Image (tube, helix red, strand yellow):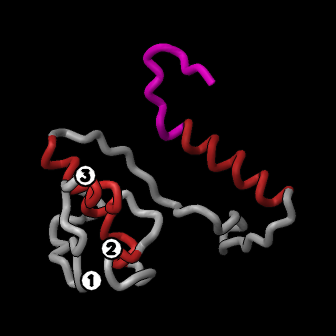
């Protein structure tokens, strides 16, 4: 897929990706519930675009992503989530293997909205 020059409609692109994916899931016969509005309850409703401003902002966003499985109680420690990019950071020596350790990391800077 080639994008037109100067195409920055990220929201529109994600809307299209979500719609096509959802149609595919429904067409495949996967059970997907609907919410009170009749919409498929497959995607998080809210979305906002955030442009990374600097290295510190990138680090804050990466920390948020790494800690999110703990926040949502999928695991008790970030390193236990097998799909996390945290493992790549550990292999590269960027973060220690026990980063976020016991699930009580200070998440004051892991906000969902920091623009």
The stretch of residues the image draws in magenta is 1-12
Give the structural element (helix, strand or loop) at label 2. helix
58 horizontally vs 88: left or right: left
At which x and y percent is residue 29?
86, 65
Q: Residues within 10 Å of mark 2 (few under 14, many from 20)?
A: many
* Mark 1 to mark 3 CA distance (whole Å): 22 Å
Q: Residue at horizontal 46%, vertical 59%?
A: 46
20 horizontally vs 17: left or right: right
At which x and y percent is residue 15?
59, 44
Which of discs 3 and 2 lies nearer the camera? The answer is 3
What secondary structure is the magenta-colored segment mainly? loop
Q: Is residue 64 above or below residue 79?
A: above
Q: Residue 78: which numbered mark, if any?
A: 2
Q: Residues within 10 Å of mark 1 (few under 14, many from 20)?
A: some
- Identify the residue under disc 3: 92
At which x and y percent is residue 23?
77, 52
């Amino acid at each position: 897929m080639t994008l037109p020059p100067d195409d920055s409609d990220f929201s529109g692109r994600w809307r299209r990706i979500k719609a096509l994916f959802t149609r595919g899931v429904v067409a495949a016969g996967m059970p997907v519930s609907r919410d009170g509005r009749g919409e498929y309850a497959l995607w998080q409703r809210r979305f906002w675009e955030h442009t990374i401003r600097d290295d510190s902002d990138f680090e804050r966003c990466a920390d948020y992503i790494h800690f999110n499985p703990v926040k949502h109680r999928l695991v008790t420690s970030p390193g236990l989530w097998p799909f996390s990019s945290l493992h790549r950071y550990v292999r590269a020596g960027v973060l220690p293997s026990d980063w976020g350790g016991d699930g009580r990391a200070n998440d004051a800077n892991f906000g969902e909205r920091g623009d």
